[in-house]
Amino acid sequence: AGYDRLMQRIDRAVVTAEATGAVRIEVEAVLNAHGVTTCFGCRHVYTIYGTGDVIVQTSLTPASAPQAPLPVLPHVALQ
């Protein structure tokens, strides 16, 4: 199905300083593979604290109607 070849295209990135002193980075991207009609919208939110702690939140949503039902996606990872 090509899901092992997904490439990320970043559409938007916003950096904000929070009142707590943390920095928040919000990234909106599209994941797709060459020749695969179904792509995914992806949103990453990185919160970086002055202590060095980093919290990463990721959401993945089908961005277009697939021609066939999506297979089970057991694992989505960041590198």
Image: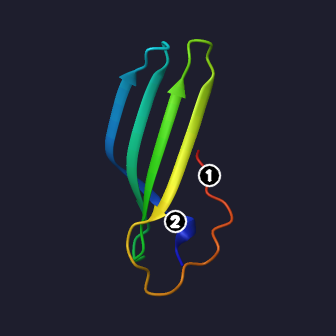
Which amino acid does the dot numbered 1 rest on?
Answer: Ala
Q: Where is residue 10 in the image (x, y as percent from the top left)?
A: 35, 48
Residue beneath disc 1: 77
Q: Residues within 10 Å of mark 2 (few under 14, many from 20)?
A: few
Q: How crowded is mark 1: few (under 14 residues within 10 Å), some or many (20 or more)?
A: few
Quadrant of the drawing holding the C terminus: top right
- Give the residue at x 49% y 18%: 22
Q: Where is residue 34 in the image (x, y as percent from the top left)?
A: 40, 71
Q: For residue 71, which quarter of the picture? A: bottom right
Residue beneath disc 2: 5
Name above or below for residue 29 compared with residue 37.
above
> In the displayed structure, does residue 44 sit left or right of residue 14?
right
Name above or below for residue 72 compared with residue 76.
below
Q: Position of residue 43 (x, y in %)?
A: 45, 48
Q: Position of residue 65 (x, y in %)?
A: 40, 78
> In the displayed structure, does residue 50 sit left or right of residue 13?
right
Which amino acid does the dot numbered 2 rest on?
Answer: Arg
- Give the residue at x 65% y 74%: 72
Q: Nearer the viewer, residue 4 or 62?
A: 62
Q: Residue furthest left?
A: 11
- Give the residue at x 43% y 19%: 18
